[in-house]
Image: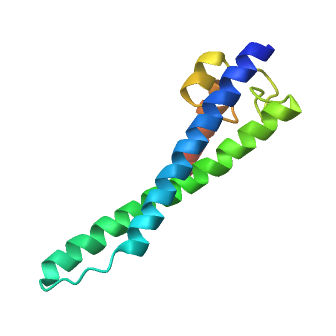
Amino acid sequence: MDKERLDFFRNFLLDQRRQLLMEAEKTLQGMSELKERFPDPTDRALFESDRNFILRLRDRERKLLQKIDKALKKIEEGTFGICELCGNEISEERLRVRPVTELCIDCKEAQEIEEKRRR
């Protein structure tokens, strides 16, 4: 992959990383500032349910941050866009849709078929 394309993906990943960290910071501030009392148990239950949903979402984003960091490291090492299983190049179309991907479409499809077979 040429330098221009690598720069595009690096900037895209860095921007995505920055946005995820800003959202995490907002969540942390919001939870630490909250000192509400709930006279109604239903209101309390709804609040807890919403908070649990947000925490699950932030956990998924934490995992995505790890993948973004790994992709950025691959850019620096010169291995970005190379399938970890077969060693072939991952198509640019696939990388645009999912820049943190580690597998080409053929290997990913084979992996998913194998996972379905095991169930």
Work out whether residue 27 or residue 70 is closer to the camera in this orientation and state it. 27
- In x, y percent, where is residue 61? 53, 52
Q: Residue furthest right?
A: 77
Residue shown at the point (13%, 86%) measured from the top left: 39
Q: Residue at x 74, y 22 (%)?
A: 6
Relative to 119, say whether 107 is above or below: above
Q: Is residue 67 above or below residue 97?
A: below
| x and y, in percent, of residue 2 in the image | 79, 13
Residue 35 relative to residue 23: left or right: left
Horizontal relation, residue 115 to residue 84: left or right: left
Residue 98 sits in quarter: top right
Q: Residue at x 63, y 39 (%)?
A: 111
Residue 5 as seen in the image, left or right of residue 110: right
**Quadrant location, the N terminus:** top right
Residue 17 or 81: which is nearer the viewer?
Answer: 17
Q: Which is more toward the observer, 114 or 20? A: 20
